[in-house]
Amino acid sequence: MADPMKIMLVDDDDGLHVLIRRLVEDAGYDFCSAYGGEEGLKVLAAEKPDLLLLDVMMPGMNGFDVCCKVREQGRRIPVIFLSAKGDIVDKSIGFKAGGDDYVVKPFNSDELLLRIEAHLRRHKQDLAFVKAVTRSGSYATGDLEVLFNQYEVRVRGEKVDLTAKEFEILALLAASPGQVFTRAQIFEHIWGEKSDVDESSITVFIRKIREKIEENPSKPQYLLTVWRVGYKFAESV
């Protein structure tokens, strides 16, 4: 059985530490915490949590500064800012610092848990994609071979001319054969939530990829449509 995922809180409010610990542990997560920015960075490095709840207004290093440091260190951990209603907070500063979400205090416990679950699920999928495009070796099925760390695809031994985005979409799906991805999930993985690219363009990208890798694009073997849901990569051909 896999170890439970770990939630970390950085906040200078004792009462919130008690509340969050009870909330996340009752939901089956592990918990760790710190009371300030400098301490938080040390605990983060030691505990390696899966998600960070980060207070905006703290003495010394504020939440925005902590988040900037986390991103400078190359950590992809989801960050949810916690902000009191009385705070004058420019959310754009938080997002530019690398934050993923905001929750206003006092918050609804069920809503916070739903947001935590959503970001953990997305982060897990992101890690699968990163693993796919950075791992050595390749994945092959039928006449198709995906060379992840070379950004290269071959059909019957011949290199296929895919754009970077086309490859990333194919690699995302090929990294988890049989797993269904919605258009929204593909969009978020490849472009991020703040992109100006239209989510409907996923359909166009899929069509272009099929034209390059499928023997008969209208009857694909590799890149399959799951009706009214999204797309998946065939488990075997």
Image (spheres, helix red, strand yellow):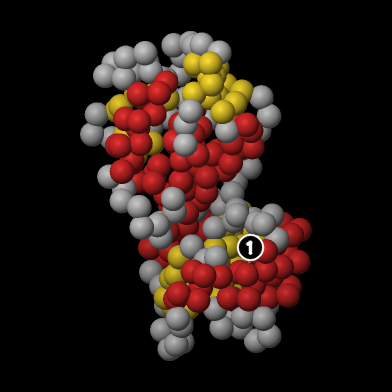
- Residue 81 appearing in the image: no
| 87 to the left or right of 11 | left
Closer to the camera in the image, 8 or 181: 181
- Residue 177 appearing in the image: yes
- Tally the numbered discs: 1
- What residue is shown at x 29% (from left), y 37% (from top)? 203
Residue 67 occupies which quadrant of the picture? bottom right
Indicate whether 193 appears above or below 69. above
Indicate whether 200 appears above or below 178. below
- Percent x, y for residue 34? 68, 71
Residue 21 occupies which quadrant of the picture? bottom right
Q: Identify residue for label 1.
A: 71
Residue 25 occupies which quadrant of the picture? bottom right
- What residue is shown at x 76% (from left), y 66% (from top)? 42
Please state which amino acid type lies under the numbered disc 1: Arg
- What residue is shown at x 49% (from left), y 23% (from top)? 160
> Which structural element holds mark 1?
helix
Closer to the camera in the image, 233 or 60: 233
The N terminus - image quarter: top right
Indicate whether 124 appears above or below 112. above
The C terminus - image quarter: top left
- Percent x, y for residue 2? 61, 37
